[in-house]
């Protein structure tokens, strides 16, 4: 994917600033994809208890859901640099603290450090997406930039978990967490030091009195992405259950890798074709296709080859769907709350993923992988209905507001 080809002010102008920011943001976000599995494996190693490991991972997830919008709101009020640097240092220190805990450490201490990590997780994704309207102000260029970003995120989820597991096997689980903390802190500080991030200015106080969820459009997007999150969590469980049922448990990782590869390819294609849908009905159409593609996995749950083919096809719809939702945020969010708005979408996906995984786990224990895949499709189907019924809230004709950047940076 040629990131430098993503345009700035027109479809033919190169955008080195955005390419640089995207590359740095991918490195900064890579450790985020390792948090859950890294904490699970390390805490189980420390305590010998999967129950304690699950408790720590749960505390991490809840804290991320709470901390994301709060940090996003702080960015909208104070700017990106201070918030990103402070959160990166705290999160890096929390990872280092987890790594340094001795075997048999008290459970409250483990859970508390995991919660601090969640609360301080730097909002790099939200900050990058807040900058894109200024870096790519042409509508077509902006949609393509969101599609490229959605595809790039798949790189982190495809590479992050295997990397942290390999590092844990080669060194130790603590060393893997410490390394993730160092990468997170350094890359986030580099992102915050980039001119586009450093010179971004919040909106005037009068424009941001209300939170990001004040508008009907933002509430619609949050509900829609919560449904997509249910799909994510249910598919992860369904694939693991299907691999176990077929007595090929080692196939779960490659199957999920194909899922991510399909999304990456879908994002690349969407970027080349214009960046996804542009209206509420267009988003509803993509969600319907996403639901159908993942419902089809239930049909293939007893055939490993068919499951591999279908999961790659179903995954190809993920990045275009997310890119479409991201491109609607600048119109949907109240003025001065765009960073918080993007953070709310991340929280919605995280909450949906947790709920989907928990529900699918219970279903898979009782009846195998098929109901987990049905739940995945059902989550996206509910999101489709919401998007279709509230399409009018997402088809706002107002022009996209460019983020506040000095002209020298935006150009």
Image (spheres, helix red, strand yellow):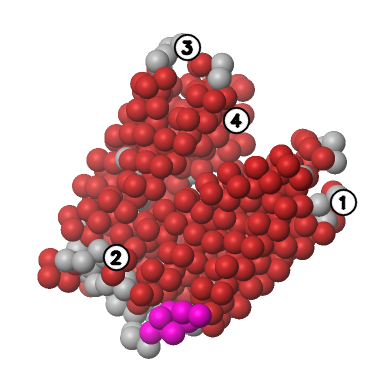
Sequence-earlier tag: 3 or 1: 3
Q: How far apart are the two marked residues, 2 and 1, measured between alpha carbons?
A: 45 Å
* Residue annotated with mark 1: 303
Along the line of sight, the residue nearer the viewer: 226 or 39: 226
- Of labels 3 and 4, the one closer to you: 3
Residue 384: quarter of image: bottom right
Q: Residue at x 39, y 48 (%)?
A: 65
Sequence-earlier tag: 2 or 3: 3
Secondary structure beneath dot 1 equals loop
Indicate whether residue 390 is drawn in magenta.
yes
Sequence-earlier tag: 1 or 4: 4
Crowd band around label 1 with a 10 angstrom C-alpha radius: few (<14), some (14–19), many (20+): few
Secondary structure beneath dot 2 equals helix
* Residue annotated with mark 2: 212
Indicate whether residue 347 is drawn in magenta.
no
- Of labels 1 and 4, the one closer to you: 1
Secondary structure beneath dot 4 equals helix
Q: How far apart are the two marked residues, 2 and 3, measured between alpha carbons?
A: 43 Å
On-image quarter of the N terminus: bottom right
Name the spot of residue 288 as percent of width and height, x first: 64, 73
* Residue annotated with mark 4: 165
Sequence-earlier tag: 3 or 4: 3
Q: How far apart are the two marked residues, 1 and 4, measured between alpha carbons?
A: 28 Å
What's the magenta bit mostly, secondary-structure-wise? helix
Q: How far apart are the two marked residues, 2 and 4, measured between alpha carbons?
A: 37 Å
* Residue annotated with mark 3: 103
Secondary structure beneath dot 3 equals loop
């Amino acid at each position: 994917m040629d990131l430098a080809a993503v345009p700035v002010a027109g479809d033919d102008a190169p955008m080195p600033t955005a390419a640089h920011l995207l590359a740095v943001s991918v490195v900064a976000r890579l450790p985020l994809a390792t948090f859950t599995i890294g904490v699970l494996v390390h805490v189980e190693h420390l305590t010998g208890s999967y129950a304690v490991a699950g408790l720590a991972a749960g505390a991490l997830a809840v804290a991320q859901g709470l901390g994301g919008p709060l940090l996003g709101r702080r960015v909208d009020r104070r700017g990106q640099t201070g918030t990103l640097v402070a959160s990166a240092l705290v999160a890096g220190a929390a990872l280092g603290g987890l790594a340094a805990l001795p075997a048999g450490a008290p459970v409250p201490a483990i859970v508390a450090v995991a919660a601090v990590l969640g609360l301080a997780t730097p909002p790099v994704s939200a900050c990058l997406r807040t900058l894109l309207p200024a870096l790519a102000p042409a509508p077509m260029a902006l949609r393509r930039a969101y599609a490229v970003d959605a595809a790039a995120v798949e790189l982190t989820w495809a590479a992050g978990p295997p990397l942290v597991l390999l590092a844990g096997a080669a060194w130790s689980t603590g060393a893997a967490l410490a390394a993730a903390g160092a990468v997170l802190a350094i890359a986030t500080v580099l992102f915050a030091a980039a001119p586009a991030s450093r010179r971004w200015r919040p909106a005037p106080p009068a424009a941001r009195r209300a939170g990001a969820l004040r508008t009907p459009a933002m509430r619609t997007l949050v509900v829609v992405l919560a449904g997509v999150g249910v799909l994510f969590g249910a598919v992860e469980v369904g694939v693991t259950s299907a691999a176990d049922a077929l007595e090929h448990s080692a196939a779960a990782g490659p199957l999920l890798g194909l899922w991510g590869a399909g999304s990456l390819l879908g994002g690349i294609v969407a970027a080349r074709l214009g960046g996804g849908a542009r209206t509420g009905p267009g988003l509803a159409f993509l969600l319907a296709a996403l639901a159908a593609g993942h419902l089809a996995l239930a049909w293939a749950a007893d055939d490993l080859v068919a499951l591999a083919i279908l999961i790659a096809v179903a995954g190809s719809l993920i990045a275009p769907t997310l890119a479409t939702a991201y491109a609607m945020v600048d119109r949907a969010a109240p003025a001065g709350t765009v960073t918080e708005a993007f953070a709310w979408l991340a929280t919605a996906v995280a909450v949906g993923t947790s709920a989907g995984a928990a529900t699918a786990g219970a279903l898979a224990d009782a009846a195998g992988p098929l109901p987990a895949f049905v739940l995945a499709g059902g989550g996206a189907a509910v999101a489709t209905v919401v998007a279709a019924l509230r399409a009018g809230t997402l088809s706002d004709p107002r022009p996209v507001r460019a983020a506040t950047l000095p002209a020298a940076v935006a150009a």
